Image: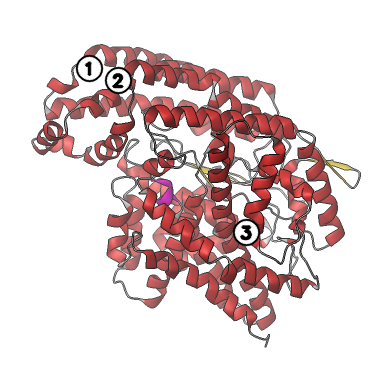
Amino acid sequence: MQPVSPLPQPPPCVAPPLDAGAAPDEPLPSWDLSDLYAAPDDPRLTADLDRAEADGKAFAGTYAGKLAGLSGEALAAAILEYERIEEILGRAMSYAQLVFSGNAEDPANGRFYQTLQERVTTISSNLLFLTLELNRLEEAALEKTIAGSRDLQRWRPWLRDLRVFRPHQLSDEAEKLLHEKDVSGRAAWNRLFDETLAEMRVPVAGEALTVSAALNQFSDPDRAVRAAAAKGVSEAFGSRVRLFSLITNTLAKDKEIHDAWRRYPRPGSARNRGNMVEDEVVDALVAAVRDSYPRLSHRYYALKAKWLGLEKLQHWDRNAPLPEEEDRHIPWGEAVTTVLDSYRAFSPALADIGARFFARPWVDAALRPGKAGGAFAHPTVPSAHPYLLLNYHGKTRDVMTLAHELGHGVHQVLAGEQGYLLSGTPLTLAETASVFGEMLTFRGLLDAETDPRRRRAMLAAKVEDMLNTVVRQIAFYRFETLLHEARRKGELASEQLAEIWLEVQRESLGPAFDFTEDYGVYWAYIPHFVHSPFYVYAYAFGDCLVNALYNVYRAGKVQDFERKYLDLLRAGGTLRHKELLAPFGLDASDPRFWQQGLDVIAGFIDELERPAA
């Protein structure tokens, strides 16, 4: 739960939607949420909500309609009180979301989550006036008030980011209506999607598997197993395609209505405003990646087809292990040690923070029915700590996912020093620590490997992860763009959604693939399209940014790199990407910036094209 305001708020930081490996048979950690609340019926939760409701009403009675006449010190005090109440609500909603993510199959968890959403929405309606009134203040008058108050200057970054949405703000009545109706609108459709996915079972070779378990089989070395899993996934989603099409169409139309009322120029603009990045910067990233498809994904998958001895790849071969790839199970303890050692080689301070997650029950890596698929890091609130959710299957990709999510967690701990309102990082920079953590872990493993064949297999696996993070996510972004543009002309049939999906897959993955028609339904399992429209380009943004940043680190061109990097993470939402990257000599608004990041991937593929030693 983020501050309630007209700003579109990001969800918990999540890993890219990738497919994983096979399930291990070992004890794995589960989290303990009692640092938030002991149970859904915890009296502390009831008391917190009651207190927030009373304080919210008192807050509105004291300040509503009066912000324009306040001194700088009084306005700063109002924002501080707003932050305090919002953090109470944020703690409650974080708890409800984590309980639901732990087991969405349990109807009691769904009811608890929905009830909390409704209660928090009602309470936060008392606070909505603050952001609306702040955005009605004239720029010159507000700047004069800020300049004259040291207390208020602390909130300058938050006010700056809030006022980005000033041109898109509606009347107070309209804003309150949209805010209160969200629980029966977008949030309800999100819940329907989550519960449908959680209870689905996929028929594979006589077994009924969860969606996550079926997708995991796409990494099986046996092509027949992968093909059977693909057939089952296609059947499971194909039989429910009308429901998923309805959810997608409804949410796209809902967004179109919101965008039209708020006067956003195009479907992705609201997300870009929330990320504090210009539409043009995102366009430059997307164009650079799409232009690089032939030298990246098309070239690599042609190599992969050759290595696998196939004339053409099918979609279920995309994450197939390579013939030289080790297929050993990596125990959880070894994975933790590998990641922490890699972090420590760069920064002992970073590793010490990361170690807290494993010394305490802050990580849920266990495999169980009903649990949310994939992985995420939830920041909760600064007065508590983040939690990590993973589904650990013991493969190299899972170790990289652990490195990714731990990066998010460490970033959230450091940014939490800024407090609730200033700790939130735009998604474009929220992926920095996660992808950097992956790169540290990969480089540590690669540099320690002396066997040329194993080194080559590791390099190929890293290229696949980078293509999944950059090429695949930009293809997802392209799918969303085309989908939302087409939806403005009318409701889309499932066949039209399939056409758009297959179009972007052919463009991005290239001629090495021969896609079957049943792959046209695979858009339906991507949760990002439902929960966080136009989020996915942030992965490519983060990967290219980190590639450039890591090159600066390896080259030793920046003095005190570790200190400056930790300062970047501590900044939270107080600085924009241009200010944060300046100490490293990088500028994301420069078109050449993206090329630097893409060149790293191309260089890895160059190395793979050379004859094996």
**Residue 52 percent location from the top left of the image:** 38, 18
Q: Is residue 181 above or below residue 288?
A: above
Q: Give how far apart the Cα atoms at labels 1 and 2 are.
A: 9 Å
Residue situated furthest front in the rendering: 489
Q: Amino acid at mark 1?
A: Tyr
Residue ID for mark 1: 63
Give the quarter of the figure containing the C terminus: bottom right
The amino acid on which the numbered mark 2 sits, given as a three-letter code, is Phe
Q: Is 135 situated left or right of 260 in this image?
A: left
User: What amino acid is labelled 3 in the image?
Assistant: Glu
| Marks 3 and 2, the one that precedes in the sequence | 2
- For marks 1 and 3, the one nearer the N-term is 1
| Mark 3, residue position | 507
Which quadrant of the figure contains the N terminus? Answer: top left
Numbered disc in front, either 1 or 2: 2
Q: What is the span of residues highlighted in magenta in the rendered image?
A: 425-430
